[in-house]
Image (tube, grey):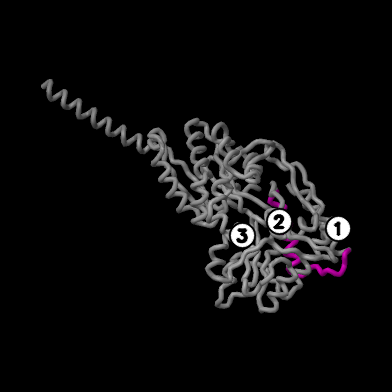
Amino acid sequence: MKIKKIISLCISGMLLLSLCGCGAEEKKRKITVWVTDETRAITQTKLDEWLGSQEDKWRRKYTITVSIMETGEVVTQFLTDVEASADVFNFAQDQLSRLIAANAISPPGGSFLESIISENDDGSIQAATQDGKIYAYPETSDNGYFMYYDTSVITDPSTLEGILGQCSAAGKKFYFPLDNGWYNMSFFFAAGADCSYTCDSDGLFTGADCDLDSEAGLKAMKAMIALRDHPAYALSTGTDAAMFNPDGGTAGAIISIPAEAATAKAYLGKNYGAAPLPTFEVDGETFHMSGFKGYKLIGVKPHTDDDTTVFCHKIAEFLSGEEMQLARYDAAGWGPSNLKAQQNEKIVSDKALSALSEQFGYCREQGQYPNLFWDLMKGFGSDINAGKYTGEDDKVLKAALADLQADIMKAR
């Protein structure tokens, strides 16, 4: 009887251990990572490999799930419900202030902070910084635009007037998103007008420094009107590179972003070209088109559990490292902020990224802007594109700029 009892107790103990083991497995903490559609697959693959190489402590306690959330939607989701949002996420730098204000981002410290500073370019580090404090991990140095062009149509991509003339001669179009504030500010910055916002340490907008209603702003507006009036101009529609399609494509040149590179190459083949933005002329003066230079960043949501906080920062550090930045380049053409990755031969020889790098020399660092600013600039560009203004009456143009300026100064 004693033997049977001992055996029974042993079996019961084994069952209990088994059940405990299953329960521990079920209680693994799921870490959610938000990335864009084009980088989801490579991110999940690389994170699975990475987690498999980590200490038992981390592998036993956590699983990682990668979900799609486009960078433009991340902050909206966080402002709706921080708790239900991802643990690690990528976002555009101009949303940093709003994340800070929502207490939705955990700044790195210790060795995590040291790796950010030592491994990334200065622009991306500055993009992750507010009020002297680094809040996020640099992910790219490619948030900008330049020009793709058909080399059989455009032989000299240096001037806007020359490009428009060459497009006209070939029966092609020059595509530009005139109704998009991120793009049409390239005219204002080029002419010498400026617009920026200040934020406090909580990420709240406190004021604006803007002179779009200046003489420089007037020149920029005239240049936009002149572009609209040229027969070779066409409004960009968002499916930019497909317009190069040899079967009915109408593009000779397109102002767009690095993500369009693969499509442009596929359509243009040996005629694929990329260049920085051109110069333009107004009232006998020449200006080089400018624009924003921006960056994508990786953030970590605050956690009350120290282990989870550390683990999420380890994920962010890996996702922002050399290996992952090169993997994203291979998968989606994203340009790295990591210094070693930038020296990789495939990055150095990339025409699109080289054109963007050159263009960045003419651009402004993209700071924090309220959403209303982008809406106002979109409306302003849409009015010009729709033919609301002509270039003949400076008083009318100045009045339009004064109205725009007044609205921008109130935007928060």
Q: Quadrant of the N terminus?
A: top left
Question: In the rendered structure, are the residues bearing label 1 and label 2 in contact, judged by CB atoms less than 8 Å apart?
Answer: no
- Please state if 304 lies on the left or on the right of 355 as rendered: left
Crowding at dot 1, Cα within 10 Å, few <14 / some 14-19 / many 20+, comes out as some
Instruction: Residue under label 1, please give it.
Output: 215
Amino acid type, residue under disc 1 in the picture: Glu
For label 1, the SS is: helix
- Please state if 318 lies on the left or on the right of 10 as rendered: right
Residue 76, visible in the rendered structure? no
Instruction: Residue under label 2, please give it.
Output: 291
Q: Residue at x 60, y 47 (%)?
A: 75
Give the prevailing secondary structure in the magenta stretch: helix
Q: Residue at x 41, y 45 (%)?
A: 48
Instruction: Residue under label 3, please give it.
Output: 257
**Does residue 22 sit above or below 43 in this rendering?**
above
Q: Is residue 384 magenta?
A: yes
Q: Position of residue 327 (x, y in %)?
A: 49, 52
Q: Residue at x 56, y 50 (%)?
A: 343
Distance between the alpha carbons at the discs numbered 3 and 1: 30 Å
Amino acid type, residue under disc 2 in the picture: Gly
- The residue range painted magenta reads 369-394
Mark 3 or mark 1, which has the lower sequence index? 1
Q: Position of residue 223 (x, y in %)?
A: 79, 65
Q: Residue at x 73, y 67 (%)?
A: 159
Crowding at dot 2, Cα within 10 Å, few <14 / some 14-19 / many 20+, comes out as many
Distance between the alpha carbons at the discs numbered 2 and 3: 12 Å
Mark 2 or mark 3, which has the lower sequence index? 3
